[in-house]
Image (spheres, grey):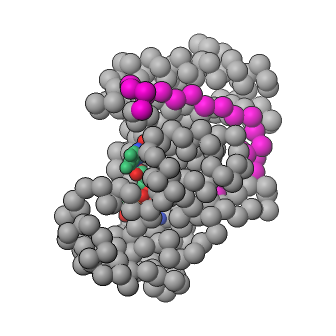
Amino acid sequence: MRLARDVDLIDIEHVRLPHSRDELWLEPGEAFMGGGTALYSEPRPGIRGLVDLTAMGWPPIEELPDGGIRIAATCTLEQLAEADSHPLFRPCVDALFGSWKIHRVATVGGNICLALPAGPMTSLTSGLDGTAVIWAPDGRDRRTPIIGFVRGPQEISLAPGELLRAIELPGSALRSPSAMRRTSLTPMGRSAVFVVARADPGGDFAVTITASTTCPVRLGFTGVPTAAELTKAIDGIDVWYADPHGSIDWRADLTKRFAEELRVELGEAA
Ligand SMILES: Cc1cc2nc3c(=O)[nH]c(=O)nc-3n(C[C@H](O)[C@H](O)[C@H](O)COP(=O)(O)OP(=O)(O)OC[C@H]3O[C@@H](n4cnc5c(N)ncnc54)[C@H](O)[C@@H]3O)c2cc1C
């Protein structure tokens, strides 16, 4: 256990370092911590203790039998980019305009659990059909798609005491041609529009929209859609997001433009 003087959150009395699942419980006033880059960035009234998940020593990335991978929630953005297991990993890490210091400690799980619309790990893992592996305090596990796990700005579907253990990306999604587009209002700003598209060899085409929406939105098609079909699907979105990083109209226009670019790019390759 580290003492409160080791951290600069003045209300924090202790930081616990669990080494086994038996020690992964939350006492009242405790919160799980990944890299701590968000937790330490502003006052957290009500949080008196932190449970540092990085002490668990989970392997950052493991291969799955279907050719997919399991990314530990504690995998750092730097580790993910260096693993280079997919062409979208590096650009998605770079979409978080923190310095190398942030990339070195911020975790994939922390980024997803913070649940900002501009969370690039949410964009990446929802775009590649990721499944959240959740550990419950009673020792049980459950799995749920990242789409649906991130429900809205700073809202995720974790019950009290549950934690995100890992994100699994299926081999089929990793093998499918995919591409992304993103932009922000200012050159170094947070993502305001983030679109990932995938053309599955079986013929299915998926467009996943984040940052311009309050939660990830997946538009699925049998075969490459026409421009009109894609526009119609985007027009049906009712969870557009606005904040100082961009208005709804601007975000919706760019979402359409990016999705169309990706439709042409991946459609020609399909
Ligand atoms: C300069 C700078 C730029 C940034 N830019 C962006 C940006 O563009 N987009 C963006 O989304 N964020 C951004 N952030 C915010 C933040 O740093 C990142 O979201 C980062 O990825 C959070 O990861 P972390 O591991 O440090 O999370 P932490 O600070 O450790 O935790 C974040 C939240 O998730 C919870 N949590 C962490 N891990 C788990 C887990 N495994 N299970 C359950 N709950 C968990 C914590 O309790 C906390 O509520 C930025 C921060 C800085 C300092």
Give the residue drawn at x 79%, y 55%: 67
Give the residue drawn at x 52%, y 29%: 182
Give the residue drawn at x 39%, y 33%: 189
Q: Position of residue 47 (x, y in %)?
A: 25, 69
Residue 184 magenta-drawn?
Answer: yes
Q: Is residue 37 above or below residue 239?
A: below
For ligand 1, give the image quadrant: bottom left
123 displayed left or right of 200: left
Q: Can residue 30 be seen in this snapshot?
A: no
175 displayed left or right of 8: right
207 or 114, nearer to the observer: 114
Q: Quadrant of the N terminus?
A: bottom left
Q: Position of residue 190 (x, y in %)?
A: 40, 36
Q: Is residue 241 above or below residue 250?
A: below
Q: Quadrant of the C terminus?
A: top right
Where is residue 228, by image quadrant? top right
Q: Is residue 218 above or below residue 21?
A: above
206 or 48, nearer to the observer: 48
135 or 226, nearer to the observer: 135
Part of the protein shown in magenta: 168-188
256 or 53, nearer to the observer: 53
135 displayed left or right of 115: right
75 displayed left or right of 114: right
Q: Position of residue 163 (x, y in %)?
A: 46, 68
Where is residue 31, by image quadrant? bottom left
Residue 242 magenta-drawn?
Answer: no
